[in-house]
Image (cartoon, rainbow, N blue to C red):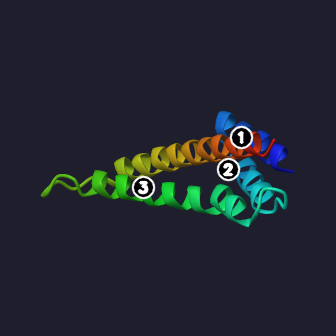
Amino acid sequence: METLAALVLAAATVLGLWYLALLGWFFAYSSKRLGQRVARTAGLWLPLLLALACGLLLYSRAHGHPGQQESSAAFQSALHSTVALWLRLSTGLSTVYLAWQISRRR
C-alpha cells in the first residue's frame, strides 16, 4: 500500500492533479505497515505544514508593500500559482518521505 501511495503521489507531483494527491495521501494515511506516526506525517502533517508556509507566502505577497493595493486579478493569479506550488511541493515532499521510510524498513 505504501509503495502505491508513493507512486500515486509522484504522479500527482509530475501532473499537478489535486485528486491524485488526495488519493495518494489517503493511501499513505491508511497504510498499516508504516506505522501510525509515519502515516500521519506523510498523509497529514507535511501537507498541512507546507499549506501554512504557502499561506504565509501569499499573505506576505498580498500585504508586502504598505499603501499599495493589489488588483483582484493579480491576487487571483497569485492565489492560483501559490496553490499550484503548494500541491507540487507537498506531494513531492510526501513522496520523498515515503520512499525514505520504505527504504528504511527493508
Question: Residue at the spot x=63%, y=59% of the render?
Answer: 41
Q: Nearer the viewer, residue 48 or 64?
A: 48
Q: CA distance from mark 1 to mark 3?
A: 23 Å
Question: Residue at the spot x=33%, y=58% of the render?
Answer: 59
- Marks 3 and 2: CB-CB under 8 Å? no
Identity, as a three-letter code, of the amino acid under mark 1: Ala
Q: CA distance from mark 2 to mark 1?
A: 20 Å
From the top left corner, tell me how far across and down residue 44 is, in percent: 63, 62
Q: Nearer the viewer, mark 2 or mark 1?
A: 1
Identity, as a three-letter code, of the amino acid under mark 3: Ala
- Determine whether, in the image, residue 16 is placed left or right of residue 36: left
> Is tag 3's residue or tag 2's residue first in the polypeptide sequence?
2
Q: Nearer the viewer, residue 94 or 82?
A: 94
Determine whether 8 is above or below 34 in the image.
above
Kindly identify which numbered label has been placed on residue 36: none
From the top left corner, tell me how far across and down residue 102 is, in percent: 76, 44
Secondary structure beneath label 2: helix
Kindly identify which numbered label has been placed on residue 18: 2
Query: Which residue in the structure is indicated by mark 3?
Result: 53
Crowd rating for badge 2 (residues with CA inside 10 Å; few <14, some 14–19, many 20+): some
Crowd rating for badge 3 (residues with CA inside 10 Å; few <14, some 14–19, many 20+): few
Q: Nearer the viewer, mark 3 or mark 2?
A: 3
Q: CA distance from mark 3 to mark 2?
A: 18 Å
Crowd rating for badge 1 (residues with CA inside 10 Å; few <14, some 14–19, many 20+): some
Q: Nearer the viewer, mark 1 or mark 3?
A: 1
Query: Which residue in the structure is indicated by mark 1?
Result: 99
Which residue of the protein is positioned furthest toward the left in this rendering? 67
- Determine whether, in the image, residue 52 is placed left or right of residue 71: right
Secondary structure beneath label 3: helix
> Is tag 1's residue or tag 3's residue first in the polypeptide sequence?
3
Q: Quadrant of residue 29?
A: bottom right
